[in-house]
Image: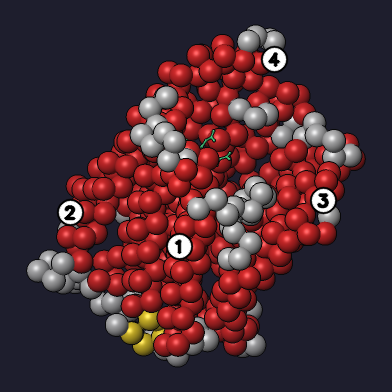
Amino acid sequence: MVTRGKKGVVSFSLVYAHLVSALVFLGIVLLAGLLYSLQFLGKYPFPGVEFLSPGRVRMLHTNGAVYGFITNGYVAGLYWAVPRLTGYKVLNEKYLGWFMFWALQAAVLATAVGLLGGYAQAIEWGETPIFVDPFVLVYLLLALFQFTVPIYQYGKERPLYASSWYIISGLIWIPMVYIMGNYIPQFFIPGVAGAAITGTWIHDAVGLYVTPLGWGLMYFFVPVILKKPIWSHGLSLLGFWGLAFFYPMQGVHHYLWSPIPMYAQYAAVFSTLVLELAVVTVIINFFMTMRGNGDALKKSVPLRWMMIGIVNYGITCLQCSIQVLLTTQKAIHFTDWVVGHAHLIMFGTFGFWILGILSYLWPKVTGRRLYSSSLDEWAFWLIMIGMETMWVDLLAGGLVQGFTWWGLNPWMDSVRFSAPLWFVRTVTGIMIFVGFILYLYNFYMTAKKENIPSAQPQEA
Ligand code: HEM
């Protein structure tokens, strides 16, 4: 399953393998999230089973989301996008590509087993067991070479697309911040200074890895689906440099009102607010690209996933500029507000982009026409409404909890008041899960041999 372009080669089998893994891990992530949500309802089905204790299942949920679902989804997108952006094949598909594929799955599975077995590293978002970290680093370095070599070859001939800027940077930044977050606080700089570095790592994992690769893919897929160029190249570079400059300084905003020196906290608040300006330029750019193409949103579900993800990104960033204020923090710190925010960005934005990429690529890599567009629509609406409702529900929960604590009421009051909202979270989780099953079934039926072959040539 390899298709040749002008000078490039896209390995359909590698794209397909990563898409399948992304789907499998999304299934595990959703199940783990649902399971853990039952703990809040006092109905956890495995009380006393250490291997499946709720705290460990929570880490399976969050780490599975980033390393299993999002990374596989992104890598599938990169295997498709990079050769098309550059006209050159990636460094090596046959050996390196397949070695990297199995190495990634092995690292995620080792992380899952390690976390459930009680070997988590005590660093937020760095829970990956310490014995898995070196392998993750090797993987990240291999990925850097695999995808940046063709971009470098193209760059010698012509200026790069905005997409390539984001992809190169994301791939360079992630090994650097991974070392910083996983090793420095644990082995070199403990205490408050270490917490400042951990905060930076938490934010950089999202801002210097998941975000730039996600935008890099959106700058490729949205114009390709719309069959028109991005509205403004200049604006896309402004957004890129805004992210590169202001994102790394924000990390301490995860620990506002903590013993970390106030000057570091103020700097984090300031750079968070300034970054919102860069975000606005990116969102304007995509909406101006969309202008006059509203119909495409009705026809193309992949585009809809991507654009709703962009809207959710805008909302999350707007929310961020409110919640980063020290006054707002007094109410929402340590509450479900933050969990709502995390879901809107990790699933409502990056996850939705991957669902869009998956829907767009699946018929192409399987060479089959989509089995059912009504199943596709059902899956979209169930997951989308489920996600947005979960977000509103958790924001409400956060306010209820924050103001109950602020009013110095007994702790148990906040638990009692939150119970109906936690129930709604589980219901919205079930909605998302049902949508996911429909999505999966549709893809399974699409890939079946008996299904109608795609009318489109595989190489667009
Ligand atoms: C069935 C759908 C889902 C349910 C029911 C669910 C439930 C949960 C629960 C109960 C928590 C722990 C909250 C806490 O400790 O207070 C959590 C955390 C989290 N989930 Fe999910 N989740 C779902 C889907 C997802 C997906 C698809 C993603 C990402 C792609 C995701 C990303 C996260 C993240 C990043 C956190 C950590 C939040 C934080 O620490 O602030 N979740 N989720």
Q: Measure how far apart labels 1 and 3 are at the Cα level.
A: 29 Å
At mark 4, the secondary structure is helix
Q: Earlier in the sequence, mark 3 or mark 2?
A: 3
Q: Is residue 252 above or below residue 404?
A: below
Nearer to us of marks 3 and 4 is 3
Residue 241, placed above or below residue 389: below
Label 4: which residue? 406
Task: Specify the quadrant of the image occupied by residue 139.
Answer: bottom right
Could you say where residue 204 lies in the image, as x and y percent from the top left?
68, 55
CB atoms at circles 2 and 1 under 8 Å apart? no
Is residue 70 shown left or right of residue 319?
left
Residue at the far bottom in the pictured view: 7
**In the depicted view, which residue is nearer to us: 369 or 404?**
404
The answer to whether residue 215 is seen in the rendering is: no
Looking at the figure, which quarter contains the C terminus? bottom left
Q: Residue under circle 1? A: 109
The kind of secondary structure element at disc 1 is helix
Say which of 303 and 344 sits in front. Answer: 344
Snapshot quadrant of residue 216: bottom right
Q: Sequence order check: which comes first, mark 4 or mark 1?
A: 1
User: What residue is shown at x 42% (from left), y 88% (from top)?
Assistant: 94
Q: How many numbered discs, if any?
A: 4
User: x and y percent of residue 327 in the render?
Assistant: 76, 24
Residue 190 - label: 3
Residue 376 versus residue 424: which sits nearer the camera? 424
N-terminal of the two: label 3 or label 4?
3
| Residue marked by disc 2 | 372
**Which residue is pictured at 51% across the width and 45% down the height?**
56
Q: Is residue 176 left or right of residue 422?
A: right
Relative to the observer, which residue lies in front, 264 or 55? 55
